[in-house]
Amino acid sequence: MKPITINNQYAEAFFNEAQLQALEPKLKVAQQDLIQKTGKGNDFLGWVTLPNEIDEALLADIEETAQRIRRKAKVFIVIGIGGSYLGARAVIEALQSPFAGHTDTTNPQIVYAGHQLSEDYLYELLQWLDHTDYALTVISKSGTTTEPAVAFRILKNHLEKKYGKAEAKERIIAITDKARGALKTLATKEGYKTYVVPDDVGGRYSVLTPVGLLPIAVAGCDIRQLVAGAQAMSLTATKDETVATNPCMRYAAIRNVLYAQNKNTEILVNYDPRLTYFSEWWKQLYGESEGKEHKGIFPASVNNTSDLHSMGQYIQEGERRLFETVLSVETNHHTLEIPTDAENLDGMNFVAGKRLGYVNQMAQLGTIMAHTEGGVPNTVIGIPELNEHAIGQLIYFFEFACGLSGYLLDVNPFDQPGVEAYKKNMFKLLGK
Ligand code: PA5
């Protein structure tokens, strides 16, 4: 399997190798702090060794449960929010056809709930489920988060009315803490099949636990290849000690050298709509890990070429506080050639005979050049192909680099005290 790559040739006008090298000693300390569990937030570093510690029995159990659900249900609802939701969605959407919901008859359709509080969304979901065979998983590490708890209460009620309590129980899987929280109490009382979120893995680093692996397996993706990709990247991330060759160190160095130049907004760019939710996962990972003590790069994303026709103007000519990291998929699954048209009324014969993927690549290259010339440095992450192995590599790559980068910034990348403020107000307003 090919490794993902990192290429900063387009950003050379903004920094040089010596500036990256200068961060190497600090990065080596940060790397050891992650490995030896000696840095800030060290009780949440279980994700560092996770890919190599997932045991065969757990993988086999997840696959068996996934098969059982796949036999029973046409639709699988994943109830969760933040780190208990985005990882699964990021992987599933990167690997499935965007039209899977309409065209795929072999895999259940994966639908999400409990990731917001929209009344109309849930009402309309229930209306659809009245006529659709479904099962669900409810995922909450704390077991007390309002959004998924409310969605689960409503969907559990619907499921029990539709199938009866005994069959509903067979269609519910709870993923939560091993001992604490309301969801754990409920799951034990009702006798649901349950998976555990490890104590030492925080939500946004939990995609390679059952939190991500169960929904991904139900969707029909190969969780072993996903884990294998993460294992491969973890070897490089933890063993290689140079900024020149360790992609995680290099990425952490690049973004911090740019941050020191007051480039305080990083845009993750993709040229394939399948990666839209990967960017959402990445935004949570970096935003929640680094945005502390009034510090941190603001993580944003664009989906190109769509957003070149909207956000492209700002990126080209707006405030020069931006830098971009481009997710560049190198091989497509399919070939689609643009036909020649004798009349050429649309004026598109200049691309006739060319693959659409080639046109997309040229759009990408042209944009990278234009943005760089306009003052927005671009770094390119090369993804050999959108498959499980590459996505597994990417997940670990971004996680490890995030840990390194958070330590360079001298924050605790593994807590999220700021997310409590809105909850306090909401609970007060709701009379809790
Ligand atoms: O990364 C995090 O810790 C958060 O995004 C949580 O995952 C999110 O708030 C959901 O929490 P829980 O799984 O406890 O319901």
Image: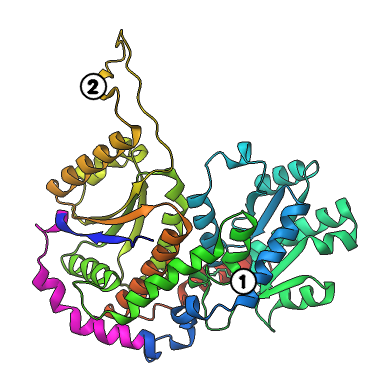
Q: Amino acid at mark 2?
A: Phe
Residues shaded magenta: 10-33
Disc 1: which residue: 59
In which quadrant of the rendered image does the C terminus lie? bottom right
| Residue 124, x across and y down, in percent | 70, 42
In the displayed structure, 300 sits above or below 35; it is above
Q: Earlier in the sequence, mark 2 or mark 1?
A: 1
| Residue 275, x across and y down, in percent | 43, 50
Q: How is the image coloured?
A: rainbow
Q: Secondary structure at mark 1?
A: helix
Q: Secondary structure at mark 2?
A: helix
Q: Nearer the viewer, residue 214 or 368?
A: 214
Residue name at image x 46 percent, y 47 percent: 274
Assess whether residue 317 is covered by the magenta stretch.
no
Disc 2: which residue: 350
Question: Which label number is shown at residue 209?
Answer: none
Badge 1: how crowded within 10 Å, few (<14), some, or many (20+)? some
The quarter of the displayed image where residue 182 is located: bottom right
Q: Is residue 142 visible?
A: no
| Disc 2 from disc 1: Cα separation | 50 Å
In the displayed structure, 45 sits above or below 267; it is below
Residue name at image x 37 percent, y 67 percent: 398
The answer to whether residue 326 is left or right of residue 427 is left
| Residue 7, x across and y down, in percent | 21, 59
